[in-house]
Amino acid sequence: MDLKVYYQKARSIEESLSEEHVVVVSKDTPDGGKAGVCTEVPKRIAARMVANGWAEVASEEVARSFRQQVAEAKQAADALAEASRMQLTVVPTKELTQLRSKMKGEKN
């Protein structure tokens, strides 16, 4: 492989990419790469993946769908993390009764 041609090809692909982070879709490769897996990578890495034939740039529709799925997964993970941080305090029944009676006295 002529490295000069390879890097020229990679640079031209990188220049053609408009976004800083690009969604790429993987291709089948002889070393076990699976086709159809979406990933968001910096445009320099995306250009190398395309130049090597490991991936292709995703269409706008596929990229939008992928980013929406990632955002939903992040929201779910954030909600789960927030739920795990919830603090509980165990109060004996006697103290709870005293607190309730104090609250009733303040409301009147």
Image: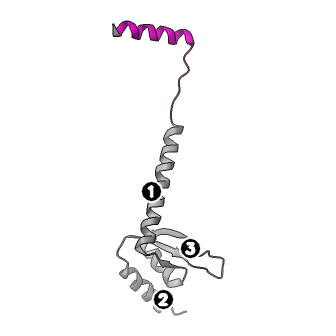
Please tell me which residue is depicted at 42% across the width and 71% down the height of the picture: 61
The numbered mark, 1 or 2, whose residue comes first in the sequence reads: 2
Q: Is residue 23 above or below residue 56?
A: above
Quarter of the image that includes the C terminus: top left
Q: Residues within 10 Å of mark 3 (few under 14, many from 20)?
A: some
Q: Secondary structure at mark 1?
A: helix
Residue matched to label 3? 36
Q: Is residue 70 above or below residue 46?
A: above
| Dominant secondary-structure state across the stretch colored magenta | helix
Answer yes or no: do the residues labelled 2 and 3 have beta carbons within 8 Å? no
Pinpoint residue 57: horizontal percent, then vertical percent: 46, 77
Q: Is residue 28 left or right of residue 4?
A: right
Identify the residue at horizontal 40%, vertical 80% (top origin): 14
Look at label 1 and name its amino acid. Answer: Ala
Residue 71 figure quarter: bottom left
- Inspect the image, locate mark 2, and give the three-letter code of the amino acid beneath it: Tyr
What span is colored magenta in the figure?
Answer: 86-106
Q: Secondary structure at mark 2?
A: helix
In percent of width and height, residue 42 lies at 43, 70
- What numbered label is drawn on residue 71? 1
Decide whether residue 101 is among the magenta residues.
yes
Q: Which residue is mark 2?
A: 6
Mark 1 → mark 2, Cα distance in angstroms: 35 Å
